[in-house]
Amino acid sequence: MSESSVSPNIVHRLETEFDAVVPAPLSRYTSFQVGGKTPALVQCHTADQLSSLVSLLHREKQPYFVMGQGTNVLVSDEGVDAVVLRFCDDTSDALIQQEGFVRVNGNMLLDHVAEKLVEHGVGDLTYLSGIPGTLGGAIAGNAGAFGRQIGDDLLRAEVLSIEGNRRWVEADELSFAYRSSALKKSREIVLQADIRVEDVDGQELREKRESILQLRKEKHPDWKSEPCAGSVFRNIEPTSAAGRRQAAGWFLEEAGVKAFHVGEASLYAKHANIIIAGEGACAMDVYTLSENMKRAVKERFDIELVREVQLIGAFANAS
């Protein structure tokens, strides 16, 4: 990487005053386990800490971006010329139960949220079981499965603007759509959220969660041993012929991509929409393979796949 846009004084301050890694290889903080470095990665343990850091970096005109668990991103081999604020707590399982809802921190892992609600016998977010990432990231991308999405169960959220200002917003202000919300455009970060719940049968929830976890285990790789970021492309929006959203994996399979590979990046044997970054793979291997997949579907079906995995850093002709 050439001379950084991040001030050396800021890097020094982050290193001495915060829980920071300087510089930091982002391959250690993303599920693809590829990609270059950032001048500084700061682990933000609380919403207050994240808020103060965002305010500081905005005031000092320093480039930055906020990342959760890093399970839905692909970082370029050149890395990123910005401070990375990691808002993810893989040990937190605290939630505050109120009348009709629970308040949960945005940096809590999504699967932990689903697990804790089952333990408390309230709500039903079992459809999110086994999905990696944080609650905040899930809300921003309106994550879901089995016909349900997190936007269906959200009451309100406290969000942090790119300038460091905090505010509460109602769910209907967030313009939820398939794998999208207004937060994608505003780049606001979810600090905490109120999730609608009601008392339910605990045993029934436990059985449902176990069934979903088993199903995901059978169909999806464990990213900790097989580096990946889940589905590379979004499912296809409904057409007049189908009347419902269609799986991108089906189109990819029919386009014959299962045998595709670039360098050490290849397709998961059980799912044509999941790329595995094998040992020795680089980010460009993964990116180029995804472009080849996208082109194959375009040529076969004249359908333009939309990327679900977020690209971080510079990729030639990125789309």
Image (cartoon, rainbow, N blue to C red):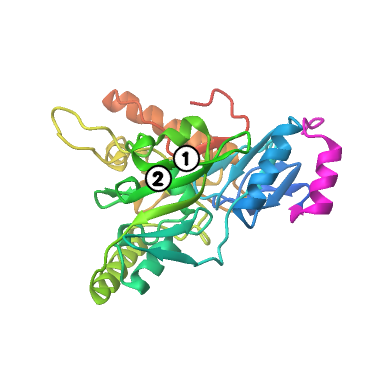
Crowding around mark 1 (Cα neighbors within 10 Å: few <14, some 14 to 19, many 20+) is: some
Check the image and report above or below for 291 versus 131. above
- Kindly identify the residue that appears in the image at 26 percent across and 32 percent down: 237
Q: Is residue 43 left or right of residue 138?
A: right
Tags 2 and 1 in contact by the CB under 8 Å rule?
yes
Give the residue at mark 1: 309
Circle on res. 1: none
Label 2 element class = loop
Looking at the rendered structure, the secondary structure element under dot 1 is loop
Mark positioned earlier in the residue sequence (2 or 1) = 2
39 or 287, which is in the foreground?
Answer: 39
What amino acid type is highlighted by mark number 1?
Val
List x then y, in percent, for residue 43: 67, 54
* Quadrant where the N terminus is found in the figure: top right
**At x 39% / y 43%, what residue is drawn?**
259
Provide residue 172's location: percent of width, then percent of height.
Answer: 33, 38
Residue located farthest toward the front when viewing the structure as drawn = 99
Q: Residues within 10 Å of mark 2 (few under 14, many from 20)?
A: some
Magenta-highlighted residues: 1-20
Residue 296 included in the magenta stretch of the image:
no
Residue drawn at the location 49% of the way across and 53% of the way down: 134
Labelled disc at residue 231: 2
In percent of width and height, residue 316 lies at 58, 25
In magenta stretch: residue 16: yes
Q: Is residue 44 or residue 259 the one in the foreground?
A: 44
Q: Quick check: can you spot residue 142?
A: yes
Between 179 and 258, the one nearer to me in the picture: 179
The amino acid pointed to by label 2 is Ser
User: Is residue 110 rendered to the left or right of residue 210?
Assistant: right
